[in-house]
Image (cartoon, helix red, strand yellow):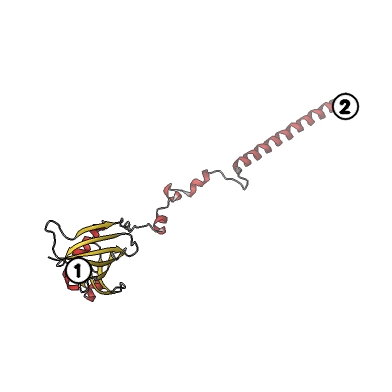
Amino acid sequence: MALYRFKVTFEDYDDVTREIDIKSNQTFEDLHRGIQKSTGYDAERPSSFYVSTDQWVKGEEFTFLPNQKRQDRGIALMEKVKLSSFIDDPHQKFYYTYNFDRPYDFHVELMKIILDEDPKITYPYVVKSVGEAPRMVVNVDVPTAAAATDDDFDFLNEVEFNPEDAEDFAEVDEHGENTESSDEDDHADDEMDEFADNEHMEDEGESYGRGGRGDDY
């Protein structure tokens, strides 16, 4: 069985490449899984190959895990299409998009055709690997501001605040002083003034009495 050797390069990371051998009667899904095995990515992601021109212009598409739109358009499934059906050029090119949710794009180019397979090797087989594949971007759910507001601590509700309890709180004036203490101090001052007035009156009475007795003599 003849083999195809493809060079696979990240479109945005051209220093990261793989060379993969695959049987001519294997499918585009086999190539898809071979590429993702070489990158370490999860192969169970919606992806597509496109027959490409030398300028990487997309043509006919073959898809994996298609969405409803692709199903309605009748796009061929990778598992149904053999590679040999679309090798028309000794340097045939395919444009490959992996994971439409967080896509990476690849250039896949036929390097050469090998006439005999090695019976000791399981294909697809990574012949050469250069560079480390970029880290996958993972979707993360971020709590909304509204959700955070709902969880805010409501002090009055949590402590079951009763308006009548406010009578137990001391009132504070604009200078930060306790007004109840001020009222008590004023009341005490009034009592002292009254006491002083009474004492003064008693002193005057005694003086007057002594003066009167002197007049009687």
Q: Which mark identifies residue 78?
A: 1
**Left or right, residue 144 beside residue 110:** right
Q: Position of residue 216 (x, y in %)?
A: 87, 25
Q: What residue is shown with label 2? A: 215
Q: Secondary structure at mark 1?
A: helix
Q: Secondary structure at mark 2?
A: helix
Disc nearest the viewer among 1 and 2 = 1
Q: Is residue 129 above or below residue 110?
A: above
Please report contact status of discs 1 and 2: CB closer than 8 Å, yes or no. Answer: no
Q: Is residue 179 above or below residue 65?
A: above
**Left or right, residue 26 beside residue 11:** left
Amino acid at circle 2:
Asp
Amino acid at circle 1:
Met
Q: Is residue 209 above or below residue 77?
A: above
Q: Along the line of sight, which residue is nearer the eye, 114 or 159? A: 114
The quadrant the N terminus occupies is bottom left
Mark 1 → mark 2, Cα distance in angstroms:
138 Å
Q: Which sits earlier in the primary sequence, circle 1 or circle 2?
A: 1
Based on the displayed image, in which of its 4 quarters is residue 7 positioned?
bottom left
Residue 81 shows in this picture:
no
Q: Position of residue 145 (x, y in %)?
A: 42, 58
Q: Along the line of sight, which residue is nearer the eye, 36 or 190? A: 36
Q: Along the line of sight, which residue is nearer the eye, 13 or 61? A: 13
Based on the displayed image, in which of its 4 quarters is residue 9 positioned?
bottom left
Q: Which mark identifies residue 153?
A: none
Residue 118 shows in this picture:
yes
Q: Position of residue 200 (x, y in %)?
A: 76, 32
Q: Residue drawn at (61%, 40%), measured in percent from left and top?
A: 181
Q: Residues within 10 Å of mark 1 (few under 14, many from 20)?
A: many
Based on the displayed image, in which of its 4 quarters is residue 77 positioned?
bottom left
Q: Position of residue 97 (x, y in %)?
A: 28, 67
